[in-house]
Image: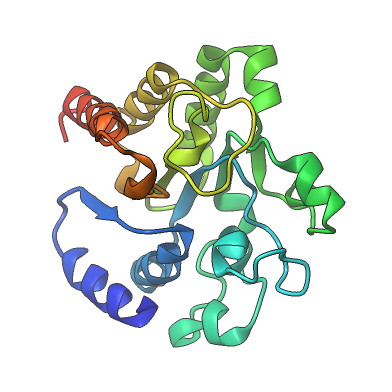
Amino acid sequence: FSIRLCEQLEAELRNENFKLVLGGDCTILLGIMPALKAKGEYGLLYLDAHADFYQPDKSTTGEVADMGLAMVTGRGPEVLTNINNLKPYVRDENVIHIGQRDAEEAKSYGSQDIKTTSIKCFDLNKIRIDGLESISDEIIALTANVPVEGFWLHFDTDVISDDENPAVDYRLPGGLTFEETSKLLTRLLLTDKIVGMSVTIFNPQLDHDGEIAEKITACLSNSIIAARL
């Protein structure tokens, strides 16, 4: 699947239109990031409640979704981390993680620690202390100074609070509101640094009346329209 997605995206990248990829979970980045790496050096903005930095022997589920960011930065089995001999698909110093709130849980299970790398991390606690506006300014300043051709924006909807978005599989207390998420996405998209976006982790079986789907759609469409993409 990753190879097929990579081939499809490589073809789409020949034009300059904004790319939107809707998928099941964070493993779709194993098809997206190699396609970008084949074109040049790109960065990754990773909005997710989880670090997704487990190594295979520490994952509590065995799902590659637990390891998505680790894999795309070159940590894990070669069959997934070195598609088309492009390892790593994105360098640590070109990654910005936003919204993590599973640090204590990940530590208790023995996950490798994302904060010991050169990945820039703005976890939920830091966002709450410094304020979303200030953190947004800092992230945008970073994107302006990272020597890449552009950024891919990965939006895992579990970065949103479970109170507002319960249609996710791995729930954690806290999180951003839909309003905060929309503001953040809009500001990031307005930078003209974003070449495309992936959206993952929405479970329609947990959205019994379709209300969450409508809210996610509104969050995305409002941000994309505001950025005139």
In the rendered view, does 170 fall on the left or right side of 220? right
Residue 198 seen from this side: no
In the rendered view, tell whether residue 107 sits above or below residue 145. below
The quarter of the image holding the N terminus is: bottom left
Q: State the quadrant of the C terminus.
A: top left
Residue found 60% across the figure and 85% down from its top: 78
Residue at 52%, 27% in the rendered image: 161
**Image quarter of residue 91:** bottom right
- Against 101, residue 59 (above or below) is below
Along the line of sight, which residue is nearer the eye, 135 or 54? 54
Q: How many dots with numbers? A: 0
**Position in image of residue 147 (x %, y %):** 49, 49
Residue 141: % across, % down: 51, 28
In the shown orientation, is residue 186 left or right of residue 139? Answer: left
Of 184 and 11, nearer the camera is: 184
How far across and how far down the image is residue 173, in percent? 64, 29
Rendered image coloring scheme: rainbow
Position of residue 139 measured from the top left corner of the image (x, y, whole percent): 53, 30
Residue found farthest to the front: 208
- Residue located 49% across and 86% down the image: 85
The answer to whether residue 196 is seen in the rendering is yes
